[in-house]
Amino acid sequence: MESLIQQTHTVVSLGLLFGLLVACATSSPRHVEPSSGKENPVEEEDSSILTRRASPPDLTIPYGADADQVIDMRYGDQRATQRPLVLLLHGGFWRPKYDRVHTAPMAVALASAGWTVATAEYRRIPGDPDATLQDISRAFEALPANVTHHDGRIVAIGHSAGGHLALWLAATRANPGLAGSLALAPVADLTLAHSLNVGSGAVAAFLGEHPERRADVNPRQLAAPGIPVTIVHGEDDDTVPIAVSDSYVATHPNVRLVRLKQTRHFAVIDPLSTAWPTVVAELEQLSR
């Protein structure tokens, strides 16, 4: 009898064990989110700044006969009289379809923060970079004579292709009125940007030839700027990779590079972004 009871217990135990194994094998596995390696995953690029509306400029000043040779003025408050004038250069990979309109919210925000802002339009003719560079020079030279409500100095700010122009201006203009340049996600090395196919061939389209033939247009190959220059670039920028700025700073180590984590291309010109306070802080530092 005892033997029969022991056999029964053994069968029941084996049955329970078998049932437990079957239950584990057939149950749904626990879902585990993959680790991103970052505390805050990068958000999708917000390009709404390109179409966001803003109030019109206080004044538009021509600096040439062409329709694109104009400067939109937005005047700051009393603080602006103790600060440099901001020359704002828009991006768009030097292409005709992108103009100064998308930087209007940025210009309004800077004027509200106490700067007088001059947003320069310029000719964007594929294959004719000299027209663009001539316009940037002419716009810069026209500012002191045509604009008041600043302390006599100028700080150039440019984004993307406009950042390239701000760096070019810093390296080539000897005018003592240029107090600094702030380049936001700039195309700072045309040769590397070309090899990375930035803007789907934007560099070659702008120059009309290989960038190695136009070292005079490439900020990385120009002389080191003789004025304070700061670059602000998002580490997750996949429009103009931060490697382009790294290349420039490796050649010009006196230039300050501010790297923004979890930041993409348009955040640095968007007053509603988390990157914007850094941009304003760097402008304040250049303005001192």
Image (tube, rainbow, N blue to C red):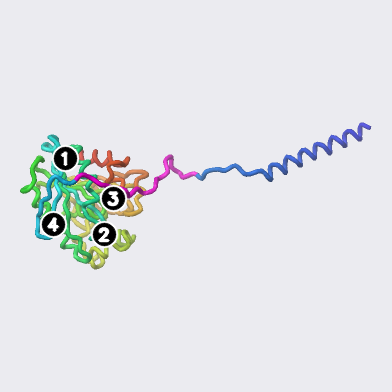
Q: Residue at x 8, y 51 (%)?
A: 142
Identity, as a three-letter code, of the amino acid under mark 1 = Trp
Q: Is residue 140 left or right of residue 30?
A: left
Would residue 8 appear left or right of 44 to someone viewing this image? right
Residue underneath mark 3: 51
What's the residue type where badge 3 is placed?
Thr
Q: Position of residue 186 (x, y in %)?
A: 26, 52
Q: Height in image: 119 above or below 93?
A: above
Cα–Cα span, label 1 and label 3: 23 Å
Query: Would you say the residues marked 1 and 3 are in contact, meaning their CB atoms lie under 8 Å apart?
Result: no
Name which quarter of the figure residue 199 lies in. bottom left
Give the number of the mark in front: 2 or 4.
Answer: 4
- Categorize mark 1 by other alpha carbons within 10 Å: few (<14), some (14-19), many (20+): many
Residue 190: image tag: 2
Q: Earlier in the sequence, mark 3 or mark 4?
A: 3
Residue at x-position 17% and y-position 54%:
121
Amino acid type assigned to the residue bearing label 2 in the image? Leu
Q: How would you rate the neighbour count of disc 3 (Cα within 10 Å): few for under 14, some for 14-19, many for 20 or more? A: few
Which residues are drawn in magenta?
35-55
Q: Mark 4 or mark 2, which is nearer the start of the sequence?
A: 4
Residue linked to disc 4: 69
